C-alpha cells in the first residue's frame, strides 16, 4: 500500500467518525467511491478500539488509513484517556495495519493540549498556543514513539493545533522545529479571524513549500479560515481533510469530499 507521505499532493482524506465497525466500514466505502485518496480514522469515536476491532475496520479499506485519537467521543466531549492509554491506541492501529498515526504535538504532556506550558523563547510560542511542546524530555519521548512506529513500517503525521493566528514566519519556524523530530508529515492548524490573517495563512503555505523538506498540511480555522482549507492544498499542502456526508458529529468547517475532488481536478488542468 502506498505510504501516506508519497500520495501525490493534495491527498484528499476522507474523515471517518463512527461508533461501530460496520458504520466505519460503510463510511470508508462512501469515501472511496467519492474520490478519497486516504482515510482519516478517529479511533476515539469508536465504542471499541482494540487491535481486533481496528483490524476489521482497517482491513476493509483499499485506501491507506491514518489513525488518530483526539481523546474525544462522537459529540466531541472528552474521552479522558491517559496519555499512556491514548498512545497505546496508536500502537494498536499500527498493529492492525494502519499506514500511519496522527501524533499530536502535546503527546506525553496533556496540559499542553490547552495552552503553552514551557519557556516562551521562540517566535511560535507567543500568544499562548496550544499543542506546542518545547521541553526536551517530552520531545525525546515523542521521538522514541516516532522511531517505534517507523520500526513497525508505519508513518507518523505530527500535528499541532495552536488555535491562534500566526504570522507566516511563525508557522515556518514551528514547522522547522517539529521537523527535527523526524515525522513523515507535519500538520499545523492556526486561526484566521479576519481577511488579513487568512491571506497570511496562504502566504505561510507558499513559504512552507519552499523552506520545509517534510510534507506539510497547513490551514487555518476560524471565521476567515475556510478558504485556506482548499487553497493551501492546491498551493502544495499535503492533505485536504474532507467529509463525505455531514452529520451532527462532523467538523462542519471541513471540505465536502466530492466538491473538493472536483476543485482539485479542475485546478490541475489550469496549473
Image (spheres, rainbow, N blue to C red):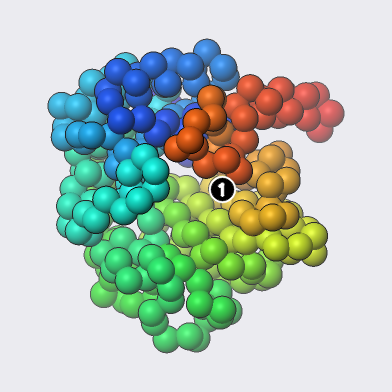
In-front residue for pair 18/110: 18
User: Position of 240 compared to 103: left or right?
Assistant: right
Q: Secondary structure at mark 1?
A: strand
Image quarter in which the N terminus is found: top left
Give the vertical position of 96 relative to 191 (above or below): above
Residue drawn at point x = 17 percent, y = 52 percent? 85
* Residue 17 in view here: yes
User: Position of 261 compared to 242: left or right?
Assistant: right
Give the vertical position of 76 relative to 4 (above or below): below
Q: Quadrant of residue 58?
A: top left
In-front residue for pair 123/229: 229
* Residue 95 in view here: no
Image quarter in which the C terminus is found: top right
The spot of residue 44 in percent (x, y) is 29, 42
In-front residue for pair 212/258: 258
Residue drawn at point x = 42 percent, y = 21 percent? 27
User: Position of 221 compared to 71: left or right?
Assistant: right
The spot of residue 148 in percent (x, y) is 22, 49
Residue drawn at point x = 52 percent, y = 13 percent? 33
In-front residue for pair 260/271: 260
The spot of residue 8 in percent (x, y) is 58, 31
The spot of residue 53 in percent (x, y) is 19, 27
Residue at mark 1: 217
Q: Quadrant of residue 105?
A: bottom left
Residue drawn at point x = 20 percent, y = 34 percent? 48
Near mark 1 (Cα within 10 A), the count class, few <14, some 14-19 or many ≥20, is many
Q: How many numbered marks are there? A: 1
Amino acid at each position: 500500500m502506498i505510504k501516506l507521505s508519497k500520495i501525490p499532493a493534495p491527498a484528499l482524506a476522507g474523515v471517518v467518525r463512527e461508533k461501530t465497525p460496520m458504520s466505519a466500514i460503510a463510511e470508508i466505502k462512501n469515501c472511496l467511491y467519492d474520490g478519497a485518496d486516504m482515510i482519516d480514522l478517529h479511533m476515539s469515536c469508536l465504542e471499541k478500539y482494540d487491535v481486533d476491532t481496528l483490524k476489521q475496520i482497517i482491513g476493509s479499506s483499499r485506501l491507506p488509513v491514518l489513525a488518530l485519537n483526539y481523546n474525544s467521543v462522537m459529540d466531541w466531549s472528552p474521552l479522558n484517556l491517559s496519555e499512556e492509554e491514548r498512545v497505546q491506541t496508536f500502537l494498536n492501529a499500527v498493529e492492525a495495519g494502519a499506514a500511519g498515526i496522527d501524533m499530536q504535538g502535546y503527546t506525553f504532556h496533556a496540559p499542553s493540549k490547552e495552552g503553552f506550558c514551557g519557556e516562551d523563547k521562540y517566535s511560535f510560542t507567543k500568544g499562548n498556543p496550544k499543542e506546542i511542546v518545547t521541553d526536551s524530555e517530552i520531545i525525546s519521548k515523542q521521538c522514541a514513539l516516532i522511531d517505534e512506529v517507523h520500526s513497525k513500517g508505519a508513518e507518523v503525521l505530527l500535528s499541532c493545533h495552536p488555535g491562534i493566528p500566526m504570522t507566516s514566519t511563525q508557522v515556518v519556524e514551528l514547522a522547522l522545529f517539529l521537523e527535527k523530530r523526524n515525522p513523515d508529515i507535519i500538520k499545523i492548524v492556526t486561526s484566521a479571524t479576519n481577511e488579513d490573517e487568512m491571506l497570511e495563512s496562504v502566504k505561510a503555505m507558499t513559504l512552507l513549500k519552499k523552506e520545509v523538506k517534510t510534507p506539510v498540511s497547513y490551514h487555518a480555522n476560524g471565521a476567515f479560515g475556510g478558504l485556506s482549507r482548499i487553497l493551501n492544498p492546491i498551493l502544495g499542502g499535503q492533505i485536504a481533510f474532507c467529509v463525505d456526508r455531514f452529520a451532527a458529529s462532523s467538523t462542519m468547517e471541513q471540505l465536502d469530499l466530492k466538491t473538493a475532488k472536483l476543485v482539485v481536478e479542475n485546478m490541475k488542468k489550469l496549473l
